[in-house]
Image (spheres, rainbow, N blue to C red):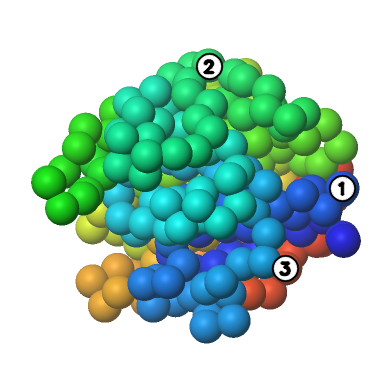
Amino acid sequence: MTPSITWFGHATFRLILTDGRVIFIDPWLRENPSCLSELKEPERCDMIVLTHGHPDHADDVPELVKKFDPPVVANYDLCMALQNIIGKGRYEYMNTGGTHAVDGVRITLTQAFHSSGVYNPRGPAYGGMPNGVIICTGDRACVYHAGDTDVFSDMKLIAKLYEPKICILPIGDRFTMGAKGAALAAEMLQPVAIIPSHYKTFPILAQSADEFMAALSEDMRKCVHLAEVGLPLPWTKHGLE
């Protein structure tokens, strides 16, 4: 299979590696109004990487764990909460600032400014600190999924330390940074490719990327890939095609 990055709506992304393995970031499928019906039941899942524990980022983890038994990579507290709720699974727990190689994929957790919790019939469970994630495979451009966050000045450090060429940035406002914040984040990160996320899902979020595009510099505007749900973006060692 051709390596690709596919938006499943909201903050959910599927990464297909060179060897055909599938990584899901923040899988929210069945109840995601932006996810196409034909995408709600994936045929493969070799790894799950989580930024935080809210339902719109982790709701489908139990089903995927039961069906595919993939390693789940997340911060320590989120892994423990999910293990207690699901009762099974393989958990690769980490924490902010750490880098860990899982089956040849290097994953780093960065800080994010948000909240986190896992919900179950007994009430919300502590999900640890929210994170952004950086995924590097060795033969493709490194990907930074910022998670749900506001812009913060240490994004300059993320750019300097990890040099992600592809940045997935939330732009929907209300629960994350909006257009101006995301544009400033892009300027600090200086990626070669930007994928906007966390918008158009609900009426209370931004319904288009127009304001974000207008807030970007001309050079950064050229880097934006307005992904369509379900349409793979070819993933190369230099960025996206």
From the viewer's perspective, tell me whether residue 177 is left or right of residue 103: left
Snapshot quadrant of residue 143: top right
Which numbered disc flags the more N-terminal residue, 3 or 2? 2
Q: Can residue 216 be seen in this view?
A: no
Q: What residue type is labelled 2?
A: Gly
Which numbered disc flags the more N-terminal residue, 3 or 1? 1
Which numbered disc flags the more N-terminal residue, 1 or 2? 1
Where is residue 157 shown, x and y percent of the image? 53, 21
Q: Name the residue under label 2.
A: 98
Callout 3 touching callout 1 (CB < 8 Å): no
Category of crowding for the residue at label 2, using alpha-carbon neighbours closer than 10 angstroms: few (below 14), some (14–19), many (at least 20):
few
Snapshot quadrant of residue 52: top left
Looking at the rendered structure, the secondary structure element under dot 3 is loop
Quarter holding the N terminus? bottom right
User: 53 above or below 99?
Assistant: below
Q: What residue type is labelled 3?
A: Pro
